[in-house]
Image (tube, rainbow, N blue to C red):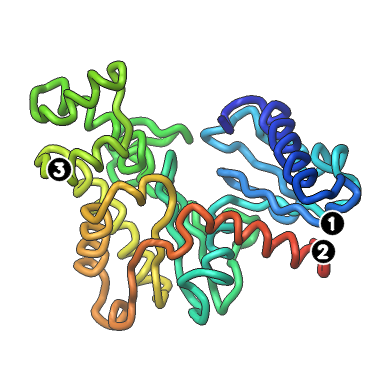
Amino acid sequence: DVRDAPEQVLDRINELVTEMLGQQGGTEINLVGLGIGVPGPVQFPSGFLIEPPLMPAWDSFPIKDYVRQKYPSAHTVVDNDVNIMAIGEARAGGGRGIDNFFYIKIGTGIGCGVIARGEIYRGSDGTAGDVGHICVDYNGPVCHCGNSGCLEIMAAGPAIAIRGQEAAQNGESKIMAKRMDNNGGRLTAEDVGQAAAAGDQAAIHIIADSGKMIGRVLAGLVNFYNPRAIFIGGGVSKIGHHLLSTIRQATLKRSTALSTRSLKIDYSKLGDDAGVYGAIWLAIENVFVPV
């Protein structure tokens, strides 16, 4: 869990990397590059997380220095996880050959990687694409960042799960109530997605609400930036076609006609591997042109 202390998480990562090196007959000395993605605002190229809402213990933690203690020969680069997913999609997925696109990650939070002229766009300080903290309801619940009604507190995985639990408890969904009983009184966004796939109207409505909120924010971004494509990834993207269809509808409805004339909105072609490909690519680039 990334919300644990950074040392605990990074030590576990070090164990896994060492294990993988051993499987390939290598050692720490053979490792020449490491690409690491973390959820939250990353000051690039220093790799420091700055006041990450979901991971307060990681604030200004020296990730690169900590990793270098274990792998001193490796060129290490740290970036926001969604940026890395966008890089992966650009180099090895559906974004190949597309100069301008968004990669939207929907999971515990919501973020956006921006590819501009074929390269990742980080902004002045590395925080470009932090769309999860765009306000969609000034009277909404308080977000982890301290503001109210942010997109991710209203529409990300935890919000979908909470609304599913409420529907189950209120008698609106027998399917989700049964799943909740089987799961020890808890539901996940995936449970809600499976209920929607089974035709549960409450679940379909919950997912549609999230999709509409995400789509409305994307419409503003489309009108502003005019991307050629939007790729949806992250854990919540697996919950089925209802989410993608409502995101598409809301985005197209609220965007200008010209900005959507050639716009493609689809799930990531790489799925869970987008971040893996992006981290590899970033590490390779960093070996030859260190940041």
Which one is in front in this view, the residue at disc 2 or the one at disc 1? 1
Q: Is residue 254 left or right of residue 63?
A: left
Say which quarter of the image contains residue 173.
top left
Dot 2 falls on a residue whose secondary structure is: helix
Disc 1 residue type?
A: Val
Q: Is residue 166 left or right of residue 286?
A: left
Image quarter of the C terminus: bottom right
Circle 1 residue: 32
Disc 3 residue type?
A: Ala
Dot 3 falls on a residue whose secondary structure is: loop
Kindly identify the residue that appears in the image at 43 percent across and 57 percent down. 104
Name the spot of residue 145 as percent of width and height, x first: 48, 35
Identify the disc placed on residue 287: 2
Earlier residue among tags 3 and 1: 1
Name the spot of residue 258 as percent of width and height, x first: 28, 83
Q: Is residue 150 above or below residue 259?
A: above
Frontmost residue, 221 versus 32: 32
Kindly identify the residue that appears in the image at 23 percent across and 26 percent down. 179
Assess disc 1: are there few (<14), some (14-19) or many (≥20) residues with their C-alpha within 10 Å of its C-alpha.
some
Q: Is residue 51 above or below residue 105?
A: above
Identify the disc placed on residue 198: 3
User: What is the distance, in whole Å, between disc 2 and disc 3 at their CAs?
Assistant: 49 Å
Name the spot of residue 31 as percent of width and height, x first: 83, 52
Q: Do labels 3 and 1 touch, CB within 8 Å?
A: no
